[in-house]
Structure formats: structure tokens, C-alpha cells
Amino acid sequence: MTSIPHLQLPDSETSCSTCAACCCQLEVMLITDTGVPQRFIDTDDWGGEVMRRLDDGWCAALDRDSMRCTIYEVRPLICREFATGSAECHDERSGMHGIYR
Ligand code: SF4
Ligand code: SF4
């Protein structure tokens, strides 16, 4: 397996700009109303509101060219609390190294 140098960097050096928005493939529940546009919202099997994901697996609100969030100012609470460089962040990055851009 090819090693990915930036995965070895200290947490403070982890950057979203070197990541293919790995965390934007996770299910994101809407637990507070931050103003996410309705077109990006789906209902899950239990009736809860979640961010809609497209067939490629990424959140519908992600710009596929820039890999940046198009609703950053009103993004869900869960997205705000997902810390760059955290253990969860590194888990997502290491699980998706094949599609790094
Ligand atoms: S928080 Fe982590 S997993 Fe999410 S885009 Fe930034 S570097 Fe990638
Ligand atoms: S709302 Fe934005 S930050 Fe949250 S998963 Fe979607 S694209 Fe990523």
C-alpha cells in the first residue's frame, strides 16, 4: 500500500485543503436548525432529517470541483463540530486515500 505522507503529520498540520472532503461522505443528522436549504435535506428511515447525499456518496451541498462546502455559513452543527486533525478526521482520511486529489 502506498503511504500518504500528510497522514503522518502532527494534528496541527492536517489541512482540509489537502483532503478530498472525506468527512462529507458521512451521514450528517440535522439536530439543530442552522438554515440548511431544504433541497439539501433528506429524511432518514426513522423520520429524522439528514443531509442529502448524491450517488457518488458525498453530501449534496459539496461543490464537486473545489471539494468545498457551498453552504459553509449555514452548515449543520455536526459539520461545525467535526474537528480538523481529530482522530475522527484521520480515520476518514485514511479510509479514503485512494481518491485523494
Ligand atoms: S475535517 Fe478532516 S476529513 Fe474533513 S475535510 Fe477536513 S481534513 Fe478532511
Ligand atoms: S454541509 Fe458542508 S461541511 Fe457538512 S457534510 Fe455537507 S458539504 Fe460537508
Image: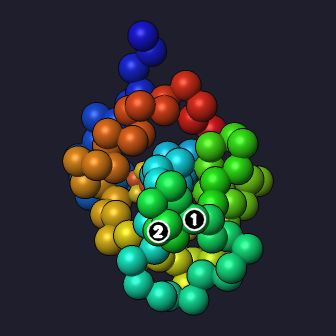
Q: Given the image, on which type of amino acid does mark 1 rest?
A: Thr
Q: Secondary structure at mark 1?
A: strand
> Of 90 and 7, which appears nearest the observer?
90
Q: How is the rendered protein coloured?
A: rainbow
Residue drawn at point x = 62 percent, y = 65 percent: 42
**Under tag 2, what secondary structure?**
loop
Residue 87 vertical position relative to residue 5 in the rendered view, above or below = below
Q: Nearer the viewer, residue 48 or 3?
A: 48
Residue to which mark 1 is pinned? 43
Closer to the N terminus: mark 1 or mark 2? 1
Q: CA distance from mark 1 to mark 2?
A: 5 Å
Q: Amino acid at mark 2?
A: Gly
Residue 27 visible? The answer is: yes
Q: Is the residue 98 above or below the residue 48 in the image?
A: above
Give whichever of 76, 84 is nearer the camera.
76
Q: Quadrant of the N terminus?
A: top left
Q: Is 71 positioned to the left or the right of 65 in the image? A: left
Q: Badges 1 and 2: C-beta atoms under 8 Å apart?
A: yes
Residue 90 place in picture, x, y as percent: 32, 43
The vertical placement of 6 against 43, above or below, is above
User: Can you tell which quarter of the image residue 92 is in?
Assistant: top left
Q: Residues within 10 Å of mark 2 (few under 14, many from 20)?
A: few
Name the residue tied to disc 2. 48
- Residue 20, quarter of picture: top right
Asked whether the viewer can see residue 13, the reply is no
